[in-house]
Amino acid sequence: MPLIGVLALQGDFEAHLEMMRELSAPAREVRTAAALQEVDALIIPGGESTTMLRLLHRENLWQELARFGEEKPIFGTCAGAILMASEVSHPQQESFSMMDIAVIRNGYGRQLDSRIVLLHPEPGIEEVLGRDLEAVFIRAPIIQRVGPGVEVLVRYNGDPVLVRHGKHLAASFHPELTTDSRIHDYFVRRVAETLSFASNP
Amino acid sequence: MDAMNGRPNFAEKISEFRRLSDEQRKDFKLKVGLAEMLKGGVIMDVTTPEQAQIAEEAGAVSVMALERIPADIRKEGGVSRMSAIKMIRGIQETVSIPVMAKARIGHFMEARVLEALGVDFIDESEVLTPADEENHIDKRDFRVPFVCGARNLGEALRRVGEGAAMIRTKGEAGTGDIVEAVRHMRTIMKEMRIIQGMRPDELPTAAKNHQAPLDLIEMVHRTGKLPVPNFSAGGIATPADAALMMSLGAETVFVGSGIFKSSDPMRHAKAIVKAATYWDDPFKVLEACEDIGEPMRGQSVAQTPEAELMAGRGW
């Protein structure tokens, strides 16, 4: 089983750890470069992307995490997706460019515009993820553009909300705030496949 | 493992427990969801867009927009009300992190105004002069989430019963003295441990003694946790104070007067952010303590006349 790290600088990292416990997948909090070295994949949770950004720089984790993303899979939700994007606006903000997506921060508005909706994955991925995913959007970013090579797994009102680029996965909503662990399960299984592929070429 | 243990799905559990409708379930989940996003961080009191910018730059997860920080309210006296709309709007336009604002206890019309303004969280706060000495705001009736102060478990659960999506221990705002924040956090944690150890047939009497809704007492019995995120406020002035409150069980800290009454607010704010993230690593807290200048001078709670204390407001 792969060991999943959850970036625990700030945000709802506990909810992701809870999901991992539900899936019986080994997981641990990551706050330092040393802890990052020990995990096979990373989840960047929801929270405030500006806060995480500043802590990553101040604690010298920025380079470490950029390098980590070149080799190992990362799954970002909401703030996590913002940090992984190639372009961030409203306001413009530095990001890792791990995925070729452009995001508008708080694109769906303030807290009063937060919402819960039922979504159906795109054809092709539907047989993997199933139907009726409850998507919790909280001051969520809009994924405005996806580059070539980015696969859109789920859309809401036409906007991509769950996307995959190579080994990385990003959601503009919070699957960790539901009782439905299908998206986390999908990520963990893909990480396991990547690892077994790497060890048995 | 008991599925009730997981805080993240708490909104689901509380909905099931309280037999809420699907609409009410979603509404509560979105409110608690935003509180979840603010965990592991620092929420800072600011009075101007410039201060809000410093707070955001320092790494605050949210700012509380208010006209006067508690230390000045304490000094200047007078009636303390909801802040000027223009000031709140200026702060909303300046930062991208969530903006909170305070309404007086029981003043549901101030809360309606703040909701219409689109603030992200309302603090029904004892720091302002109470508007109603019997009733709190019925917070279930709002789409914007509320945070409320509490000194003990009963008070916390009464507020959750009224619809609060976040609890903060009250402490004693504007003093820079941590003693009340510690007292309130320890009280709530200890009362929850006692409830957890009870037989189920003792819970109705516990509910009576705590003057709290029985179903919420039953939830605490099963989970050992508050039904909503539990933050800490009132007297946090240094990085070590912040780390202390996190290690006592706070999931995020509010820092009011502590930052902008210190000698170098930006450095001070950064250091407190660091201590709130790395509270369980004394070497990191040490680094944070080294980074600061002179903290706010403060005022000991023990030497403050009883009439000037704010924590007693709320019922």
Image (spheres, rainbow, N blue to C red):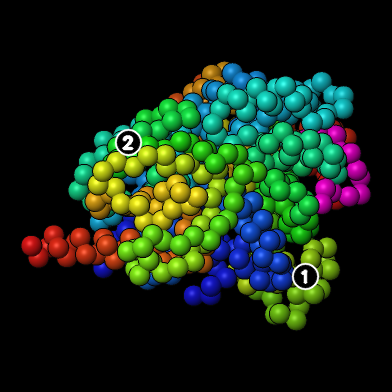
Left or right of B139? Residue A195 is left
Please determine whether, in this image, residue B263 is positioned above or below residue A54.
above
Chain designation of label 2: A
Name the residue that disc number 1 marks.
B214
Q: Is B163 covered by the magenta stretch?
A: no
Q: Residue at 82%, 30% (x, y): give it.
A: B81
Observer-nearest of B212 and B299: B212
Percent position of residue A42, x then y: 32, 52
Percent position of residue B254, x then y: 62, 38
Name the residue that disc number 2 marks.
A86
Where residue A11 is drawn, which disc sits there? none
Observer-nearest of B131 and A195: A195
Residue B234 found in image quarter: top right
Left or right of B287? Residue B119 is right
Q: Residue at 91%, 49% (x, y): give it.
A: B134
Residue B8 found in image quarter: bottom right
Q: Estimate how packed mark 2 is, as few (under 14), some (14 to 19) or many (20 or more) residues with alpha carbons within 10 Å.
A: some
Label 2 residue SS? loop
Tag 1: amino acid: Leu
**Residue B227 seen in render:** no
Q: How many marks?
A: 2
Chain designation of label 1: B
**Cβ atoms under marks 2 and 1 closer than 8 Å:** no
Label 1 residue SS? helix
**Which is the main secondary structure of the residues drawn in magenta?**
loop
The range drawn in magenta is B125-138
